[in-house]
């Protein structure tokens, strides 16, 4: 059976939009008023007729240049028709609205002879349709890809590079006995090596010994249950099978696998129908023995999610080194060593071009295997992989296959991404907004927000490996180089990237244009851009943080020449204003002038009826928004972060389509009141409300109706003053009236001037709240009951000048039904609390636990705090205590603690008699702290990697437990620093083994007599010893020393008879002075 999301031609999505628009009331009325009903019907018939042959045309274009050109012409006229109907639709909507304050567009489309333009589109379409017989394009033909060569389990293991760790991890999964029948999906883009790794596992000796039955089945795109079951039965029995009835096939299969441990590989699965999978597995899902496994290889994470019982294994690209080894194997295997060396440089550049895709590496190596001329190699390096013929390359068919099976609407969305440069990291939200502006998103019949539809499209492309998550952050994605090439290949001349000086690639039919800012000298050739008079997208992309003089200056007539623009991004340009002509862009839906010098936007922007997205983030000079911004009735996204705005224009409540509003500024004397937020009922995402101190009456803030905005996920409230107020009770009422909806995930409150928080803060009904920040609430004298929040993961409290003590009220109300306080909290930061003296923790006394999942605990700049900290923290891995000079307590008990950092805390006690507390510690930093510490047993820290002690006044010794055996071995220790410890006298007697220690630093330890004993034997990896201000160590040298260990010879002018070097005998050293 075919895919759940049916594959369709790229232009199918365009014609679906045209058919939808041509049947709209606005377009029908336009034609009726001009007695052009017959023309409208003819156009509709043409659209339907052309749409019927698109599948056949898209398949034939790969081998027939005439069909490809036919499709290009069709795209061009279809886009022109789309613009035409969009303008008719827009003008009708504007006139129907009858809003006297909304100015008519400066240049009415009707004055330019709309009938003639429609006739022109009609004639072009008639001509194109007439060519379909000449090109032998068939109606209703289902799109099919060329037959793929089936795979098998047979392979050459020596042909595989860079997959040892993948193989080991997968073999362990296959041999595990966690469940009865385990399904392990291997997921990755086409050509990444999924089949190869499956073959490695299948042929592994340990795997073959483990299973009674093994079978390899090549599935491919058609998930025919009967055929696959029959193939599986034949593979298991090694006999041909004539049975065609599914019932008999499944009965025989069940009997054959009964109580036997099996391993099946289902290679290249595309099925997204769970019911098909459930029917197929029914014969053996309960019949096989415990520990049986099924390995599935697929390009789609959605397929994996349907079939998996074990999390999918995502296969990544090869490293450059492994790619080169694979390339060398296939390109130079015939043994000419001299040739190999002469082609190394260009070969490695070709390999880098493949970006770790094994299929690309192997294909290009095979192509070049018989070529000895270096110029031939450079031709391949400088050419596009898509220029290769199918007979020469498996790359094109492999990656095009993934594209082929995309539905039409996803093909259009993917092809649009051709405007992104290689290695460019894009955010999901930004790309969805671009798709929305271009009209690629189909309105859902399930009444979902159009942004949610876009999110679904995006996730589908991620699932199919067109987009890959970036390592930089969860919200960023990128495309593999060859997938990027594929996007360029399918979009053709309609998408152009200006990188460097290639503006000559811009054609009349170009619709999408991006300008890549390579450096501050980048500019755009206006004459070249204006050739594309039907341009829809001008997107400035800034991979580097720099600004440019766009066009050298912003020409006033640019926008009048590009009237079809839907997306205009001028991010990072040195422009100070936009021309009034921007109001003539009827199609414009996306406008971005982020990080520019703009102070004001022209009022003509209020004429942009279709505008959906307005991005002004980083416009640090922007002091006001257009007064008529309320007329933008289709505006959905307004980003005004990092601007100089101090108030909002009046009538903001009329922007009823608004879905995302980054910031709202409460005006002091004029502008919109906060109550106007009440009408914006569809707000989602993040909202930051500034200047709350300007709210006169809490009834105004009640009108904001934040409690009803269920789509808000992050809310920030800022009083923006110095935290002072004449009426703290009024401020409490205001904060109470700003209670958000319980769906909120993040909450930040800044400069709140009240003395108490309202009851809603800390209410366990906020079950989605995961992050909370309370900052600069200078008069608050107690904390809210935050321990009751069931999902709170991160909490930051800082600059509470009036808070003296924290008690049980912080954990929760006594009558609360909460069993554990802070049950989900992972990160806690308490900072800059100048008056805080006591923390009373009595959760254990109440029979309840607190902070059971806390991983990070920071307590800093609390100069008056004394007493105890929370003690039993079983999940704590990071503890930082800094600048708490009066804190008199012991380190909390935390078995999982890995990093401990204590600074300027003289009274804190370090527990040296509880060895179980420090077993997991890997990094210990003590700075001017723990004055009671006299000796530090290294035995406490068996896994320590870094020990850094500075200014421990009374520390005398590092010790180890006494033993007659060999010195204790601290195998993880890499770095040891002891500085400014005036009473430190000795290292452990007899020395201590630190086989991985690379750095030893000892500074200003005046009483230290010697370095560790047997350093040359016990510290073989030591690379650097730093000494300074240690006069008692046996050296006559008074200047500081840095002894670098990098040669068997002691170079320089150091006296080798110096007693210091006798201590270092056997170490390989070179000496150089230093002031470290």
Image: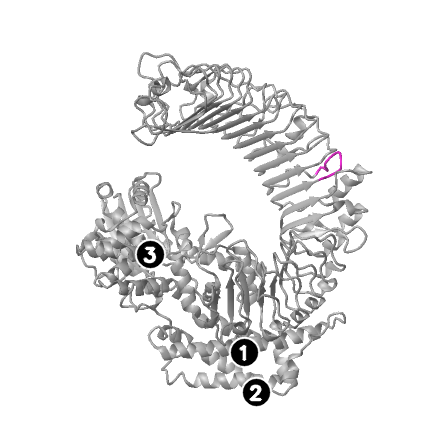
Q: Comparing marks 1 and 3, which lies closer to the viewer?
A: 3
- For the point 17% across and 56% down, the residue is 334
Q: Comparing marks 1 and 2, which lies closer to the viewer?
A: 1
Mark 2 neighbour density, 10 Å: few (under 14) some (14–19) many (20 or more): few
> What colour scheme was applied to this rendering of the protein?
one colour
Residue hosting label 3? 349
Residue hosting label 2? 38
Asked if the stretch drawn in magenta spans residue 40, the answer is no
Mark 3 neighbour density, 10 Å: few (under 14) some (14–19) many (20 or more): some
Q: Comparing marks 3 and 2, which lies closer to the viewer?
A: 3
Which span of residues is magenta-colored? 751-759
Q: Which of 411 and 105 is in front in this view?
A: 105
Relative horizontal placement of residue 753, taking residue 956 as reference (left or right) = right
Check the image and report above or below for 805 versus 451.
above
| Image mark for residue 81 | 1
Q: How many angstroms separate mark 1 from mark 2 (CA)?
A: 17 Å
- Picture coordinates of residue 554, whole percent (x, y): 62, 67
Q: Which circle's residue, 1 or 3, is located before the other in the chain?
A: 1
Main secondary-structure element of the magenta-colored stretch: loop
């Amino acid at each position: 059976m075919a895919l759940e999301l049916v594959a369709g031609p790229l232009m199918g999505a365009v014609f679906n939009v045209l058919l939808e628009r041509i049947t709209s009331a606005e377009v029908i009325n336009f034609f009726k008023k001009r007695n052009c009903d017959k023309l409208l019907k003819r156009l509709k018939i043409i659209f339907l007729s052309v749409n019927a042959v698109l599948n056949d045309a898209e398949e034939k274009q790969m081998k027939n240049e005439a069909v490809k050109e036919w499709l290009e012409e069709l795209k061009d006229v279809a886009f022109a028709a789309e613009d035409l109907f969009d303008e008719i639709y827009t003008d009708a909507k504007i006139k129907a609205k009858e809003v006297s304050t909304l100015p008519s567009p400066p240049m009415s489309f009707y004055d330019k002879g709309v009938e003639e333009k429609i006739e022109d589109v009609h004639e072009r379409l008639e001509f194109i349709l007439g060519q379909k017989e000449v090109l032998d394009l068939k109606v209703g033909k289902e799109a099919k890809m060329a037959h793929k060569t089936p795979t098998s389990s047979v392979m050459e293991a020596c042909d595989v590079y860079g997959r040892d760790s993948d193989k080991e991890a997968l073999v362990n999964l296959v041999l595990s006995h966690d469940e009865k029948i385990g399904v392990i999906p291997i997921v990755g883009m086409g050509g990444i090596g999924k089949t190869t790794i499956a073959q490695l596992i299948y042929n592994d000796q340990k795997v073959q010994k483990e299973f009674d039955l093994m079978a390899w089945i090549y599935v491919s795109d058609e998930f025919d249950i009967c055929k696959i079951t029959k193939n599986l039965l034949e593979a298991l029995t090694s006999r041909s099978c004539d049975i065609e009835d599914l019932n008999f096939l499944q009965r025989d299969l069940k009997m054959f696998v009964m109580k036997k441990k099996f391993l099946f590989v289902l290679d290249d699965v595309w099925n997204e129908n769970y019911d098909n999978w459930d029917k197929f597995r029914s014969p053996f899902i309960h019949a096989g023995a415990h520990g049986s496994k099924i390995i599935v290889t697929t390009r789609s994470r959605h397929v994996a999610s349907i079939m998996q019982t074990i999390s999918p294994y995502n296969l990544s690209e090869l490293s450059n080194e492994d790619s080169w080894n694979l390339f060398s194997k296939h390109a130079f295997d015939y043994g000419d060593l001299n040739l190999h060396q002469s082609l190394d440089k260009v070969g490695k550049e070709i390999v880098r071009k493949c970006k770790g895709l094994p299929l690309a590496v192997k294909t290009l190596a095979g192509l070049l295997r018989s070529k000895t001329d270096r110029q031939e190699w450079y031709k391949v390096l400088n050419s596009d992989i898509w220029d290769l013929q199918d007979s020469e390359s498996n790359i094109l068919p492999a990656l095009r296959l993934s594209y082929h099976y995309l539905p039409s609407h996803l093909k259009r969305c993917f092809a649009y991404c051709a405007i992104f440069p290689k290695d460019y990291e894009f955010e999901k939200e930004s790309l969805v907004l671009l798709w929305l502006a271009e009209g690629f998103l189909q309105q859902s019949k399930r009444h979902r927000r159009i942004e949610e539809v876009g999110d679904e499209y995006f996730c589908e492309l991620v699932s199919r490996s067109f987009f890959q998550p970036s390592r930089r952050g969860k919200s960023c994605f990128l495309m593999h180089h060859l997938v990027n090439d594929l996007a360029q290949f399918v979009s053709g001349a309609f998408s152009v990237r200006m990188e460097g000086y290639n503006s000559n690639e811009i054609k009349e039919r170009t619709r999408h244009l991006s300008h890549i800012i390579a450096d501050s000298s980048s500019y755009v050739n206006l004459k070249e851009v204006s050739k594309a008079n039907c341009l829809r997208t001008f997107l400035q992309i800034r991979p580097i943080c720099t600004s440019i003089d766009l066009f050298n200056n912003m020409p006033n007539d640019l926008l009048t020449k590009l009237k079809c623009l839907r997306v205009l991004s001028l991010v990072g340009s040195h422009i100070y204003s936009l021309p009034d002509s921007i109001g003539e862009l009827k199609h414009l839906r996306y406008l971005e002038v982020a990080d520019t010098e703009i102070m004001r936007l022209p009022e003509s922007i209020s004429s942009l009826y279709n505008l959906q997205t307005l991005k002004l983030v980083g416009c640090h000079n922007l002091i006001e928004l257009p007064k008529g911004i309320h007329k933008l009735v289709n505006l959905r996204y307004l980003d005004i972060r990092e601007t100089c705005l101090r108030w909002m224009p009046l009538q903001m409540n009329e922007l009823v389509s608004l879905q995302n509003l980054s910031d709202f500024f409460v005006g002091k004397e004029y502008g919109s009141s906060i109550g106007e937020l009440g009408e914006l009922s569809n707000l989602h995402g993040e909202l930051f409300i500034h200047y709350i101190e300007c709210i006169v009456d809490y009834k105004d803030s009640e009108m904001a109706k934040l409690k009803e905005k269920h789509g808000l996920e992050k809310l920030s409230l800022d009083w923006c003053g110095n935290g002072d107020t004449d009426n703290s009770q009024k401020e409490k009422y205001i904060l109470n009236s700003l209670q958000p909806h319980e769906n909120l995930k993040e909450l930040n409150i800044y400069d709140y001037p009240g003395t108490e928080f309202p009851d809603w803060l800390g209410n366990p009904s906020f079950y989605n709240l995961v992050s909370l920040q309370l900052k600069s609430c200078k008069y608050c004298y107690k904390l809210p009951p935050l321990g009751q929040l069931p999902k709170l993961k991160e909490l930051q409290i800082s600059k509470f000048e009036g808070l003296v003590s924290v008690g049980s009220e912080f954990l929760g109300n006594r009558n609360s039904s909460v069993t554990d306080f802070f049950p989900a909290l992972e990160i806690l930061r308490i900072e800059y609390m100048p008056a805080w003296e006591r923390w009373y923790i009595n959760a254990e006394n109440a029979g309840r636990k607190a902070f059971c999942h806390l991983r990070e605990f920071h307590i800093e700049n609390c100069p008056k705090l004394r007493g105890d900290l929370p003690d039993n923290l079983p999940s704590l891995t990071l503890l930082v205590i800094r600048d708490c000079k009066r804190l008199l307590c012991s380190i909390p008990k935390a078995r999982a603690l890995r990093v401990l950092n204590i600074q300027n805390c003289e009274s804190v006690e370090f527990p040296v008699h509880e060895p179980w507390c420090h077993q997991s510690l890997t990094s210990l930093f003590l700075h001017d702290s723990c004055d009671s510490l006299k000796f530090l047993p290294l035995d406490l820290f068996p896994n320590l990697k870094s020990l850094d002690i500075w200014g421990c006044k009374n520390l005398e010794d590092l010790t180890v437990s006494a033993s007659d055996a060999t010195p204790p071995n601290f195998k993880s220790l890499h770095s040891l620093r002891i500085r400014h410890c005036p009473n430190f006298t000795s290292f452990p007697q007899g020395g201590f083994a630190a086989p991985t220690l690379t750095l030893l630093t000892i500074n200003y330890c005046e009483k230290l007599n010697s370095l560790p004993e047997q350093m040359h034997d016990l510290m073989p990896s030591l690379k650097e010893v730093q000494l300074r201000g240690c006069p008692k160590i046996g050296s006559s040298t008074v200047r500081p020393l840095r002894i670098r260990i990098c040669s068997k010879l002691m170079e320089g002018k150091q006296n080798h008879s110096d007693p210091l070097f006798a201590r270092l005998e056997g170490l390989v050293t070179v000496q150089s002075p230093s002031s470290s």
